Image (cartoon, rainbow, N blue to C red):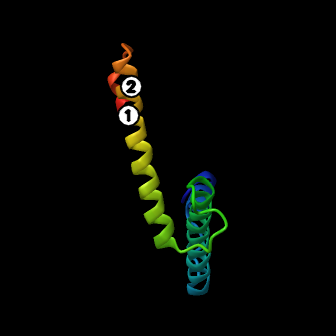
Amino acid sequence: MSSPTSNSQTAADEKPRLSEHEKKANHIASEQKRRQAIREGFDRLTELVPGLEGQGRSESVVLKKTVEFMREQLAERRRLVGRVEALGGQVAEDERR
């Protein structure tokens, strides 16, 4: 004979199984949430990357322009680090990257 606590623990440990319909609905909701997060990320990039404001959103164009912008920013950073050092300043190694 089992004790009342072990019966209640077993009942609490067992989760009701989802029906196939519920599994499918959860999957669809999860996929919609994932796609919405991607859309929001692309929208945010169009706000941050110059030249993308107010354009229709082609994801390939957004990615291409974002990469170009980041390369320009990295080149500018290298230029500024070089200028600081040329003027006698020091830039910590972890801030050079």
Q: Quadrant of the C terminus?
A: top left
Report the residue at 57% width, 60% height from top: 51
For label 2, the residue is 83
- Amino acid bearing label 2: Arg
Sort mark 2 into few (<14), some (14-19) or many (20+) by Cα contacts within 10 Å. few
Which quadrant is home to the N terminus? Answer: bottom right
Find residue 61 and report its horizontal and vertical position in percent.
Answer: 48, 70
Q: Residue furthest right?
A: 54
Q: Residues within 10 Å of mark 1 (few under 14, many from 20)?
A: few
Residue with the mark numbered 1: 79
Instruction: Write the residue at 57% across / 83% down.
Output: 24
Find residue 70 and report its horizontal and vertical position in percent.
44, 50
Disc 1 marks a residue whose amino acid type is Arg
Position above or below: 61 against 65: below
- Hey, which quadrant is residue 84 in on the image? top left
Q: Quadrant of residue 17?
A: bottom right
Q: Nearer the viewer, residue 44 or 11?
A: 44
Mark 1 touching mark 2, by CB under 8 A? yes
Q: Position of residue 64 (x, y in %)?
A: 43, 65
Q: Is residue 32 left or right of residue 94?
A: right
Q: Secondary structure at mark 1?
A: helix
- The answer to whether residue 7 is seen in the rendering is no
